Amino acid sequence: MKLIFALISFAILSATQFSFAGINEDSLVGKKKVSLSFYDTSSIFQENWKVNITFAYADKSYSAAQTINLTDSMRGYSFPIESKVTSPFGKRGHSFHKGIDIPTPKGSEIRAAFDGKVRYSTYNNGGFGNLIIIRHANGLETYYAHLSKRKVKANQIVRAGEVIGLSGNTGRSYSPHLHFEVRYHDKPINPENVFDTQSFCLRNDSAMLGELILKNNKKHRTTPPVSEEFLAKGTVYSIKPGDTLSKIARNSGSSVAELCALNNLDQDAVLRIGQRIRVN
Ligand SMILES: [Zn+2]
């Protein structure tokens, strides 16, 4: 019920204009546009909002049948660091690995997976080391652990693809890597059910929470990589946080319709940070 209320209030808010801290609506990537005031008024960012506690929900229940939108209101996405996963989610010896491990040289830039609000940014003594937790408009939380440096503070609004910290080896970690988790109401979800870790694209625009939480979602959609041959025939632009098709069209003397036709994109396509498109 609260989720329904949140979605309704979100729909109302998204119709209003805003301008805040140099970010304006036009600079945001994606389908539906969320007013920044959504982060202050939505129950998602008020209830169980604890900046000093790792697991904020305790034993709050959830409905496995509810649908989690991964693109609406999320305005783009970014795999936190585009590098190979070496330790997957799941049973690992006598314990359960609640995230995925991505080895990366110390000091590598770690990016927010989706737009959201930082709920937690502190040194965690439970093994995570320097840990950042971001809560997203769909209720998911993403965890970024073992960082050498945290670049965002609790209650800060971040955008998909924004650098939030640098990778490291803090906490219970034996070599520099990012430990990345996706959770809903503290319940861990296999990040590889959300992201294809080969292409670094989202698997689906939305998914049932129950399917995300269950071990392996076989109905994975893989976005084919754009061919190098196609890219080599024109000028290539790499999507950055805050980009929209209209902004890219304006800067390249093109139109949204032309960009879409050329790259075989929907006008309201959710753009992946780092995705390469041709501008002519
Ligand atoms: Zn790990």
Image (cartoon, rainbow, N blue to C red):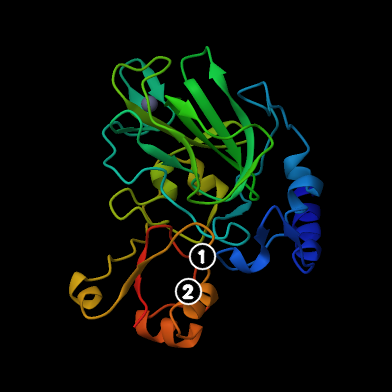
Residue 248, horizontal then vertical, whole percent: 47, 74
- Residue 35 image-quadrant placement: bottom right
> How many tags in the picture?
2
Which residue is nearer to you in this view: 253 or 82? 253
Label 2 close to label 1 by CB (< 8 Å): yes
Residue identifier under label 2: 248
Q: In this view, does 279 lie above or below 166?
A: below
Which residue is nearer to you in this view: 63 or 190? 190
Q: In this view, does 205 lie above or below 85?
A: below
Residue 124, horizontal then vertical, whole percent: 54, 17
Can residue 164 be seen from the camera position used here?
A: yes
Q: Please give left or right for residue 148 compared with residue 73 in the image.
A: left
Which residue is nearer to you in this view: 253 or 83? 253
Label 2 to label 1, Cα distance in Å? 7 Å
Residue identifier under label 1: 243
Q: Disc 1 on helix, strand or loop?
A: loop
Can residue 268 be seen from the camera position used here?
A: no
Q: Disc 2 on helix, strand or loop?
A: helix
